[in-house]
Amino acid sequence: MSTPFAIIAGVGPGTGAAVARKFSAAYPVALLARNPANYEDAVKDIQAAGGKAIGISTDVSDAKSVQDAIAKSQKEFGDRCAAAVFNVGGKFVRKPFLDLNLGEFESGWEVNGRGAFLFSQSVLPLLLKSTQQSTHPPTLIFTGATAAMKGSAQFAAFSPGKFAKRSLSQSLAREFGPKGVHVAHVNVDGVIDIERTKEWMKDAGEDAKIKPEAIADAYWYLHTQPKTCFTQEMDVSV
């Protein structure tokens, strides 16, 4: 029987790549991102380290694109999934509510709401197939943000999609937890230490930002929890 694989949607140079590298030590991994440049380096690094990895250009808000990505993953690695991570952030729009247009409002929901739905509906059948054979409980993890906990001023285009993703994770946890699939939502409450944020908070000290590798460690911890102790929501902060 083939080793189950892990799939990470929303791979970039930060959290997504770190999670892919972490899980590649145990599983073949499929890395999904709209722009191939976002996953190419991580795929090369994993392969150079002796792991198995493929990258697939995917628009998570498009049903056919998600279905094609899952089909390619299955063709490469089989039909059992050990872990699926939805790490897609979506477009960040912050402006006064009366200045928003419909496209800006819908952009946040299309990725975080519809995208999370499409991804979950595609991977859950593969996670369910792994409940009896996997070393650890099959796991579906959603990367969230503080905007999923509270709707701040001028976040009307950003928060609703984050709330939708979080509530979806809660519903799926209650439905699929009893079937052996661990569903978790992680609130990443802080600035992630990546190249894009290099100039942010420069005077706050080296520990003021969250390391992507530390987030990946937290995700691995969730994945390895036994069925008798599933964490549904986790806060990661500094």
Image: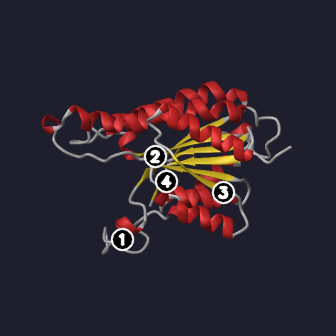
Q: Return the disc, 4 or 3, that comes first in the chain's sequence.
A: 3
Query: Mark 1 falls on what kind of element?
Result: loop
Asked whether the viewer can see residue 231, the reply is no
Q: Looking at the image, is mark 1 or mark 2 nearer the viewer?
A: 2
Q: Are marks 4 and 2 in contact (CB under 8 Å)?
A: no
Please count the marks in the image. 4
Which residue is under mark 4?
236
Q: Amino acid at mark 1?
A: Lys
- Residue 117: which numbered mark, if any? none
Which residue is under mark 1?
198
Q: Residue at x 65, y 28 (%)?
A: 176
Q: Residue at x 42, y 74 (%)?
A: 206
Spot occupied by residue 86 in the image (x, y as percentages of width and height): 53, 43
- Residue 88: which numbered mark, if any? 2
What's the CA distance linking mark 1 and mark 3? 28 Å
Image side of residue 24 versus residue 171, left or right:
right
Spot occupied by residue 137 in the image (x, y as percentages of width and height): 73, 41
What's the CA distance linking mark 4 and mark 1? 20 Å
Instruction: For label 4, count other residues whose C-alpha is less than 10 Å away and answer few (under 14), some (14-19) or many (20+).
Output: some
